[in-house]
Amino acid sequence: MAKILIVDDEKPNSDAYKRALELDSSLYEISTAANEHEAEVLISKENFDVVITDLAMIDDQSGMRVLNFSKEKQPLTMVIMVTAYADKMDRYAAFENGAFDCIAKSTPGLKTTDEIIAKTKTALYFREMIESQIESQKKVAVLKRYFDPKVFSQLDNHDVLALKSKTITIVFWDIRGFSKACEILKAVPEAIAKFLKAYFDLASKIIFKHGGVLDKFIGDGIMALFGSLNENESSDDASSAAKAAIDLKSEFEVLLEQWIVEWSLYTPEIIKIGLGSGMHTGECLVGSVGTEIRDQYTALGSAVNLAARIESRTIDKQILVSQTTYARLAKSFHFKDAGIINDIKNIPGDFQIYELIEEIK
């Protein structure tokens, strides 16, 4: 039986979420907490599979503290952040701290309880998948999922995994309209979960094909690194990232067509989703970080944040790149001007971005 904790200082909200989950499944054991302090007491006493927490309670960072405490106690806890104040939620900060997903109560056309049901089921699916991996593999084998098996032999050299400063190209992908699709298909969450698995499998193969490292899955998003295993930075790293983004854009459309047919068996409503991608080339700390329980090869630093923010500006089928990535690709790929962004949280300045169209043949 899955153990779920709901943390919200407004009792009508926690009651509504609890009632909706209980009506959806009898296989949930659900506890509630009125604030972060009550949540910490409960979390310290037992392990929860999913924690659903409001962002703003005692203050605007209450939910983040629940997230951090949950992940410190049990790294496999899937934490879903919920808020009515979307402008106060730094989604990428939440994801960087281990959140599974974020829900904005004010999202037009969505019912919060239905979205919580769908994302709780998806979170439990991914937790089960991760637990299965941990049980069947040793720590070093877990790391293999980040790398193309062809290059995994390099990891015998522990220096490759050591945290070091490198210039790499970071790429983020995210599915536009996915929350709405979850709402439409809430009665058949397995149809969403199977689609996500197919999408992640496809993306992994394409990232590996172009020499990239699969950093992480973020809800319905993906983060990949290009050039992190190379001794010296090269424009070829950015080129590999661009080719991967173009390939995934094309292959995603083929995959989506197949699933649109599948989903039509369950709903008469039109489902509109699309893939957006953003990339930036910059200096990061790259290497293996973690504990004996959970290890991860990843990149850290403001360059990662900028790549994520660029991705957040994309629309369906759009690939946006930073000036530094464009400079490395301008002679080999077609671009068009995508304007200037200057409102990136915690990163002051004006940043020119470009839309990647295609490779020059």
Image (tube, rainbow, N blue to C red):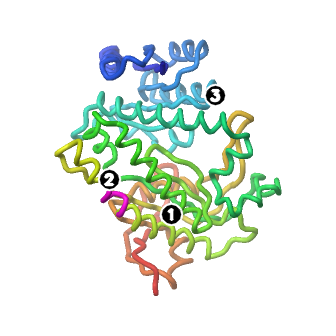
Q: Secondary structure at mark 2?
A: helix
What is the CA distance from the residue labelled 2 to the residue labelled 3? 37 Å
| As drawn, 193 above or below 168 | above
| As drawn, 145 above or below 170 | above
What is the CA distance from the residue labelled 1 to the residue labelled 2? 27 Å
Amino acid type assigned to the residue bearing label 1 in the image: Met
Between discs 2 and 3, the one toward the N terminus: 3
Residue at 56% x, 49% y: name it.
Answer: 216
Amino acid type assigned to the residue bearing label 2 in the image: Trp
Between discs 3 and 1, the one toward the N terminus: 3
Residue at 39% x, 61% y: name it.
Answer: 252
**Residue 300 visible (yes or no):** no
Q: Is residue 151 left or right of residue 195?
A: right
Amino acid type assigned to the residue bearing label 3 in the image: Glu
- The dot on residue 279 is 1
Q: Is residue 213 left or right of residue 270?
A: right
Pick the front one: 164 or 223: 223
- The dot on residue 72 is 3
**Image position, residue 192 (x, y; %):** 36, 43
**Image position, residue 291 (x, y; %):** 73, 36
Q: Is residue 286 left or right of residue 191?
A: right
Residue at 72% x, 48% y: name it.
Answer: 288
Pick the front one: 212 or 88: 212
- The magenta region covers 254-258
Residue carrying label 2: 259
Circle 2 Cα neighbour tier, 10 Å, few/some/many (<14 / 14–19 / ≥20): some
Residue contact between numbered discs 1 and 2, judged by CB atoms under 8 Å:
no
Q: Secondary structure at mark 1?
A: strand
**Image position, residue 163 (x, y; %):** 75, 52
Q: Secondary structure at mark 3?
A: helix
